[in-house]
Amino acid sequence: MLLLFDIDGTLLIGAADAHRDAIHEALRVVHGVTEPDRRGMQVAGRTDGDIVRALLTHAGVSARRIDDSIDDVRIAACEAYGRLCPDDLTACVAPGMRALLERLGARDGTLLALVTGNYEPIARLKLRAAGIGEFFPRGQGGFGSDHEQRAQLPAIARQRAGNDTPWPRQRTILIGDTPRDIACARADGVRVVAIATGPFAAGKLHEADAVARDAGELGALLDELLDRERAAPPTLQL
């Protein structure tokens, strides 16, 4: 089974300040936008590129200038985060999450990867500072640096996991904390388990296949799904 984990609000809680500041610095350096206006903008579950586009559009930057500079902004943001990332984010790991990752990583036939709106260098630095980067191998996952639309990321992650052919949808589960996580899983036809440790209460996540209140409940739900899949006959459907 391929388990695709979101980062902010799922694996980590309260680890986004330096990330936000790095994005703002990149907008200032590349576009001269000194005070990006986030009022009324729900950023949870969006990709970095999507957030950048929304902030720049609101600041009056033309679509053409945004498109022409999208790589420059990404590079500047990742460089800034390299300086701004705290040395230690272990206190931001969601309670019980490290133990869950250790247990899932030890299960035969289970691959852990990321599906996150973070640019990949930011995601890797963030998880390394949190002490859980070891569970998510390089060369796997889907990131905000791969595509601006989050709905495209699960398919990218499945392609990387499957090498020559995409990892099967029916053997993939996405884990996230926002309605956008649920929507991106639905867009790719994979199952999704939501966890209510981010900005959305469990009632707002009801469109997921299952909802957990914390890492303990998430572990129980995933164990049930993984055990059921192990007992099921193989299928060739992708």
Image: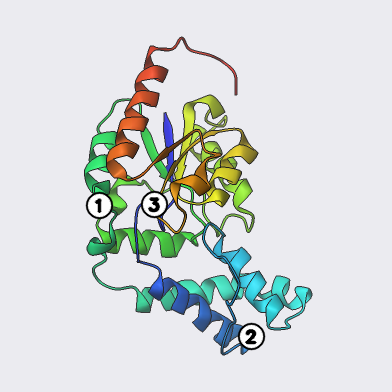
**Secondary structure under the numbered disc 3 in the rendered image:** loop
Q: Nearer the viewer, residue 21 or 141?
A: 21
Q: Is residue 161 above or below residue 96?
A: above
Q: Nearer the viewer, mark 2 or mark 3?
A: 3
**Secondary structure under the numbered disc 1 in the rendered image:** loop
- The CA span between labels 2 and 3 is 32 Å
- Rendered-image quadrant of the N terminus: top left
- The CA span between labels 2 and 1 is 39 Å
Q: Residue at x 61, y 33 (%)?
A: 189
Say the numbered circle drawn on residue 31. 2
Q: Position of residue 121 (x, y in %)?
A: 44, 63
Q: Residue at x 38, y 12 (%)?
A: 231
Q: Image check: 200 left or right of 84?
A: right
Say the numbered circle drawn on residue 10. 3
Residue 140 appears in the picture as rendered: no
Residue neighbourhood size for the residue with mark 1, other residues' Cα within 10 Å, grouped as few (<14), some (14–19), many (≥20): some
Q: Is residue 208 above or below residue 114?
A: above
Q: Residue at x 52, y 54 (%)?
A: 143
Residue neighbourhood size for the residue with mark 3, other residues' Cα within 10 Å, grouped as few (<14), some (14–19), many (≥20): many
Q: Amino acid at mark 2?
A: His
Q: Residue at x 50, y 74 (%)?
A: 77
- Rendered-image quadrant of the C terminus: top right
Task: Kindly identify which residue carries mark 1.
Answer: 95
Disc 2 + disc 3, Cβ < 8 Å: no
Q: Image check: 90 left or right of 145?
A: left
**Secondary structure under the numbered disc 2 in the rendered image:** helix
Sooner in the amino-acid sequence: mark 2 or mark 3: 3
Q: Amino acid at mark 1?
A: Pro
